[in-house]
């Protein structure tokens, strides 16, 4: 008995549709190639005034968690860690050895920096350091600080002071500078007055490797906030970035 022409036509249509669906959906998981090498995330958004940006790489292996200390957790002198609403790079990611580390502090009043500090209004660059010995009523320095474990503030470690203060700040007078970067997507709620503090990695002296760092800053009501994160500092491999030039 001969094959029905209508049945052949239907079988042909089914084969065509199946083939088209396979092409559109892409390869099956077993056919998908496994990518190797470090993962590169999008660089941190920049403002209209260009500066060296962060190129973020993921950690290989287990994720490092920041160490637990009395100052890293809320309580005691650390009264308002939630005023430190964000930082970049994010926890367990990396920053170029020629990049920058940022901290955002936000409150109902302008966050404090040291008295009489001179900030370039257009860029936020700190032109002249203020009184770096000035302290809040809690006996901690008013100037925001960054520490590298184990030399933390509670261990009387070396304080690294920011190179930029972008946004609303109180240096004895309520003032505002510009060129603030876009707040990272993963951040706490922004308040009425926000200050971005920026450190140049090379000025801290961090070379390639993993570090635990501690941020210390006062909100606009002179309440202390402390947060700790883990980061990795890297130099872009020659194969990925000839001459180790930073992205622009």
Image (cartoon, grey):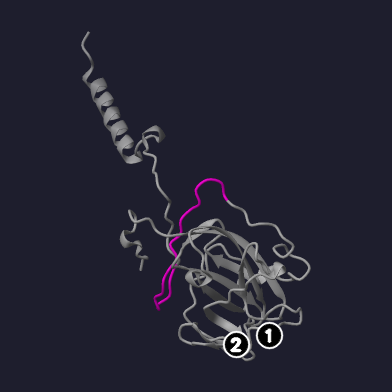
Q: Residues within 10 Å of mark 1 (few under 14, many from 20)?
A: some
Q: Where are the magenta residues, as a range?
A: 45-63
Q: Using the image as rendered, state which of residue 238 and residue 92 is in the foreground.
A: 238
Q: Using the image as rendered, state which of residue 167 and residue 218 is in the foreground.
A: 218
Q: Which residue is mark 2?
A: 130
Q: Using the image as rendered, state which of residue 24 and residue 165 is in the foreground.
A: 165
Q: Residues within 10 Å of mark 2 (few under 14, many from 20)?
A: some
Examine the structure image and report whether residue 48 is included in the region drawn in magenta: yes
Disc 2 and disc 1: Cα gap in Å?
9 Å
Residue occupying the point 52% across, 79% down: 164
Q: Is residue 246 left or right of residue 178?
A: left
> Disc number at residue 56?
none
Tag 2 and tag 1, C-beta contact below 8 Å: yes
- Percent across and percent down for residue 89 are 52, 63
Q: Which residue is mark 1?
A: 134
- Percent across and percent down for residue 195 are 57, 78
Examine the structure image and report whether residue 54 is included in the region drawn in magenta: yes
Q: Is residue 30 above or below residue 36?
A: above
Q: Quadrant of residue 91?
A: bottom right
Q: Is residue 54 above or below residue 137?
A: above
């Amino acid at each position: 008995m001969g094959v029905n022409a209508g049945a052949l036509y239907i079988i042909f249509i089914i084969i065509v549709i199946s083939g088209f669906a396979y092409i559109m959906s892409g390869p099956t998981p077993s056919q998908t190639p496994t990518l190797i090498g470090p993962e590169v995330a999008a660089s941190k958004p920049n403002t209209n005034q260009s500066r060296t940006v962060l190129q973020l790489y993921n950690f290989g292996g287990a994720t490092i968690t920041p160490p637990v200390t009395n100052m890293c957790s809320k309580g005691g002198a650390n009264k308002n860690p939630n005023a430190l609403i964000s930082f970049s790079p994010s926890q367990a990611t990396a920053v170029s050895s020629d990049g920058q580390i940022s901290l955002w502090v936000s409150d109902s009043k302008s966050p404090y920096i040291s008295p009489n500090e001179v900030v370039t209004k257009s860029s936020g660059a700190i032109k002249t350091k203020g009184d770096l010995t000035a302290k809040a009523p809690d006996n901690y320095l008013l100037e925001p600080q960054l520490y590298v474990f184990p030399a933390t503030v509670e261990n009387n470690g070396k304080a690294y002071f920011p190179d930029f203060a972008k946004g609303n700040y109180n240096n004895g007078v309520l003032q505002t500078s510009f060129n603030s970067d876009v707040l990272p997507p993963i951040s706490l709620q922004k308040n009425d007055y926000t200050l971005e503090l920026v450190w140049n990695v090379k000025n801290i002296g961090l070379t390639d490797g993993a570090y635990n760092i501690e941020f210390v800053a006062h909100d606009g009501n002179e309440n202390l906030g402390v947060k700790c994160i883990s980061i990795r500092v890297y130099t872009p491999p020659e194969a990925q970035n000839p001459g180790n030039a930073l992205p622009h």
